[in-house]
Image: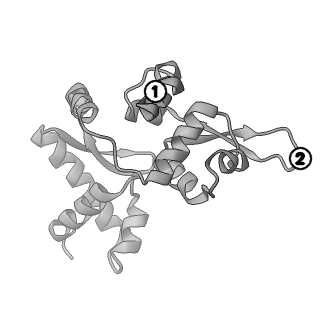
Amino acid sequence: MTIDELKPIIESLVFVSEDPMSARQLAAILEGESTEDIETACLQLVEEFNARGGGLEMRSIAGGYRISTRPEFSEYVRRYLKAQPSARLSLAALETLAVIAYKQPITIPEILEIRGVTSTSAIKTLLDRRLIVARGHKQVVGRPMLYGTSKEFLLQFGLSDLSELPNLEDFEDLMSS
């Protein structure tokens, strides 16, 4: 393929990737294409994005390439995201997240005790979405992992800190009405 044929393919791959994509990763996907041609195409894409001066930029970061919004428009993006409902979570994931938010730091067996059902897949989903993080190990036999909410949790739910979580009593009042 020519550099001009590679650029739209690379642009689409970098766009859909959650993490920066290196020329080596792109070469593995674009079998038969040289890393040098891919690197050239990436550099040309970076120049084109910068020359256009639009709302998106492509840049080299952390050993790869990433497409993101320009920092000068972050306030508008933040307003938009704040107005949008957060990505959908299953009922099990939401219940697990609520237990973690209110009882953190907490272990998986403690979550099981509260919910009455296994929460392993919900924990994985919450970790994948970076809504919770590991907070070390509980100092008991077996040293189970402790989990708590993350900064991303606060961002997704528009909270400045955990003190802004609704009181559990408010929920109990809603349930009894």
Q: Amino acid at mark 1?
A: Asp
Nearest the camera: 96 or 1? 96
For mark 2, give the secondary structure: loop
Q: Quadrant of residue 146?
A: top right
Q: Is residue 139 above or below residue 160?
A: below
Specify whether 53 is left or right of 154. left
Q: Which residue is located at x 46 percent, y 27 percent?
A: 173
In the rendered image, which quarter contains the N terminus?
bottom left
Quadrant housing residue 74: top left
Give the residue furthest to the right. 141
Identify residue type, mark 2.
Answer: Val
The residue tagged with tag 1: helix, strand or loop?
helix
Which residue extends farthest front? 177
For image coordinates 38% across by 53% down, the residue present is 18
Circle 1 is placed at which residue position? Answer: 173
- Picture coordinates of residue 77 (x, y %)? 23, 33
Crowd rating for badge 2 (residues with CA inside 10 Å; few <14, some 14–19, many 20+):
few
The residue identified by callout 2 is 141
Residue 38: mark in rendering: none
Q: Quadrant of residue 136?
A: top right
